Amino acid sequence: MKTLNKNILLLLTILIFIIGCSSEVESSNKQTIDKDLEQIDNDFNQITNNVKSNNNNNNNNNNNNNNNNNIELTEDSINSNLISAFDSIELFDINSNKTFTISQFSDKPIFIESFAVWCPTCTRQQKIIKQLHEMDLDIEYTSISLNTDPNEDRIKISEHTERHGFDWIYVIAPEEITTYFISKFGIGFVSAPSVPIVLICPNKEPEFLKTGIKDTDYLIEKLKSCEVNS
C-alpha cells in the first residue's frame, strides 16, 4: 500500500507541476487534467476506505477472540490516532541538522507550508514568511516548510534555503504526514502552486488557510486568531 501511495503522490506532483508551470492550457487539456486529478482523489479515498475497513475487520476479529467484547472503531478514534501519529513523528530539520517532533511546539501557533523547490509561487510565499520573521511581533510562533515533492532531496532544499536566506525549519515530508494532511484537507495540500499553508493553534484542529499568496497582514491576523480562541 505504501508503494501505491507513493505512486499516487508522484503522479499528483507531476500533474500539479504541469498545471503550475503552464501559462496557456487548452480547455480540453484542462478537462483532461481535472479528470485525472479527480481519479487520483478517488483512488486515494478508496485507499483510505480500505485501510479503515481493514482496521474494522481486525478489530472485529480481536473482539471475537476476547469474549465478544465489542469495541467499535469510530471516525473520531481514527482521527485521534492520525493526529497523535502526526504529532509524534520524528522529523529532520535540514537547516539545523536536528531532529524534532511537531508536538515540541504545541504550546504556540505553527504554520506548516507545503512546497516544492521548483515552484516559483512557493518561493514568493516563503519570501513573505521571511518578512514576517523579520518583523517585531509580540506573538511567538513556529514556521515549518514541508517539502512534498518525492523527487527533491536534502541537497536541493539546502541550496534553495541558502540561496534565499530562509532560516526556519525545512523538512522533507514523510509519507505518513503527507497522507495525514491529504486525508484531512484533500489533494490541495500537495498542490504546490496554490501555496498551501496549514495553521495549528494550541489545542485546536489544524486549519487549512486560503489558497494563493498570503501577505504578512493576513498571516498576522491568523496568528492573532489563535490567541483570541485560546
Image: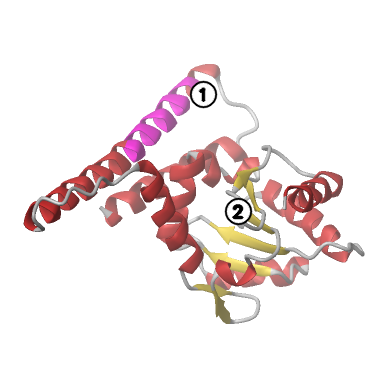
Residue at x 43% of width, y 44% of height: 183
Q: Can residue 12 be seen?
A: yes
Closest to the observer: 146 or 180? 180
Badge 2: how crowded within 10 Å, few (<14), some, or many (20+)? many
Q: Amino acid at mark 2?
A: Phe
Q: For label 1, count other residues whose C-alpha is less than 10 Å away and answer few (under 14), some (14-19) or many (20+).
A: few
Q: Which residue is mark 2?
A: 115
Q: Are marks 2 and 1 in contact (CB under 8 Å)?
A: no
Three-letter code for the amino acid on which mark 1 is drawn = Lys
Residue 209: quarter of image:
top right
| Main SS category, magenta section | helix
Q: Secondary structure at mark 1?
A: helix
User: Can you say whether 182 is above or below 67 in the image?
Assistant: above
Looking at the image, which residue is at 65% across and 69% down? 169
Looking at the image, residue 83 sits to the left or right of residue 100; the answer is: left
Q: Is residue 42 magenta?
A: yes
Secondary structure beneath dot 2 equals: strand
- The span picked out in magenta is 31-45
Q: Please tell me which residue is depicted at 8% across the width and 55% down the height of the picture.
A: 67
Residue 97 percent coordinates (x, y): 59, 82
Specify which label sits upstream in the sequence, 2 or 1: 1
Q: Which residue is mark 1?
A: 30
Q: Is residue 41 magenta?
A: yes
Q: Residue at the far bottom: name it.
A: 97
Residue for point 60% across, 72% down: 104
Whether 107 is drawn above or below 82: the answer is: below
